[in-house]
Image (spheres, rainbow, N blue to C red):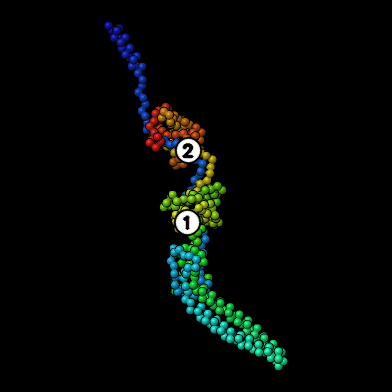
Amino acid sequence: MKRLWMVSAGLLLAACSKEEAPPEPVRPVLSIEVRALDQQALGRFAGNIQARYETNVGFRVPGRIASRNVDVGAEVKKGDLLATLDPTDQQNQLRAAQGDLARIQAQYINAQANARRQQQLFDRGVGAQAQLDVAQTDLKTTAASLDQARAAVDQARDQLNYSELRTDHDAVVTAWNAEAGQVVTAGQQVVTLARPDIKEAVIDLPAGLAERLPEDVVFEVAAQLDPATRTTAIVREIEPQAQSATRTRRARLTLTDTPPGFRLGTAISVTLSSAIEPRIELPLSALQEVDGKTRIWLVNPQDQTVSPRDVQVLERSDDSVLVANGIKPGDRVVSAGVNSLQPGQKVKLDEDAR
């Protein structure tokens, strides 16, 4: 009986040993698809949209400003009146010149009559050659004086017109440097006009970056309030000297095209990048250090299992690394939860990965 019991117990133990071990639990993990980076970010800088051409306008004659007809921000058309001077002085000069012209015109009429009379007397043989010569000389002198008087009237009329400041092209008023009642000199800067048809992006770059910009650098310009409004640009000029306070150099960029949202003064964000050899960047949380080696965990998309893969770290930053060897674009890598994984273990991917 005892022997029969021992045989039964042995058979029972053998059956238990053949039972399969319970499956390992499915681990939920976060993952990312590997992509090769072929652009290097050089920084992002704030700036604004400005007019490429600005004109500082002033009166061509001195005087006291009588009126200011437009405000800052106003759009003006060619020929619009911007400001006026008190025209009293110019009006007096014009009247004086017109009076001189009238006097000389009367003298010219008398000189013409005298020359004609002396010519008739000389033709009849009763006039002297000397008197004819004097009369003709007086006529020529008076004619020259008449031309001079007419020019003086034209000049006085121009001076009166110059007491009105008008724009010679479509523009936007960006600044006033004088007020009504202020006395200005000829040529003194009074108002600044910007041409809205040609715009450019203006940013301040660190002096070090401005000196080592790659030749293939790409500038992506986007409106800060509407990032969908964007374009690209190229460098038109960079100021040769850095500003002493900020150690930055102002860069002016020519826009590839000008979206309607890029108005004068629009705040923009400019991203700089350049082409590089393709490389792979992963989050720091995707790495696992084991026995002095660095490895990652690749996800098999067919059966949702993971396997370790050794990689070479090229460069580290605070939250990412550049890696090489053992990985290629298109692979899916576990980005969080790597420390509790086992080779061949099934995982549950995050919703975005599926």
Determine the residue positioned at 56% across, 77% down.
154
Residue at the bottom extreme, as displayed? 126
Q: Position of residue 202 (x, y in %)?
A: 49, 55
207 or 60: which is nearer to us? 60
For label 1, count other residues whose C-alpha is less than 10 Å away and answer few (under 14), some (14-19) or many (20+): many
Tag 2: amino acid: Arg
Left or right: 240, with 121 as reference point: left
| Spot occupied by residue 347 in the image (x, y as percentages of width and height) | 39, 30
How crowded pointer 2 is (Cα within 10 Å; few <14, some 14-19, many 20+) is rated as: some
Mark 2–mark 1 contact, CB under 8 Å? Answer: no
Residue 254 or residue 2, whichever sits in front: 254
Task: Report the residue marked by disc 1.
Answer: 49
Q: Secondary structure at mark 2?
A: loop
- Position above or below: 177 against 234: below
Q: Can residue 252 be seen by looking at this rendering?
A: yes
Q: Which quarter of the image is occupied by the C terminus?
A: top left
The residue sitting at 27% across, 6% down in the picture is 1
The residue wearing badge 2 is 35
Image side of residue 304 versus residue 232, left or right: left
The residue most toward the front is: 124
Instruction: Give me the C-alpha separation between circle 2 and circle 1.
Output: 34 Å
- Whether residue 87 is situated above or below residue 215 in the rendered picture: below
- In percent of width and height, residue 267 lies at 44, 55
Q: What amino acid is found at the position of numbered circle 1 in the picture?
A: Ile
Tell me what residue is drawn at x 46 percent, y 36 percent: 34
Q: Considering depth in this image, is 57 or 114 the residue closer to the camera? A: 114
Q: Secondary structure at mark 1?
A: strand
Q: Position of residue 178 (x, y in %)?
A: 46, 69
Q: Is residue 293 visible?
A: no
| Residue in view at x 55 percent, y 81 percent | 97
The earlier-in-sequence mark between 2 and 1 is 2
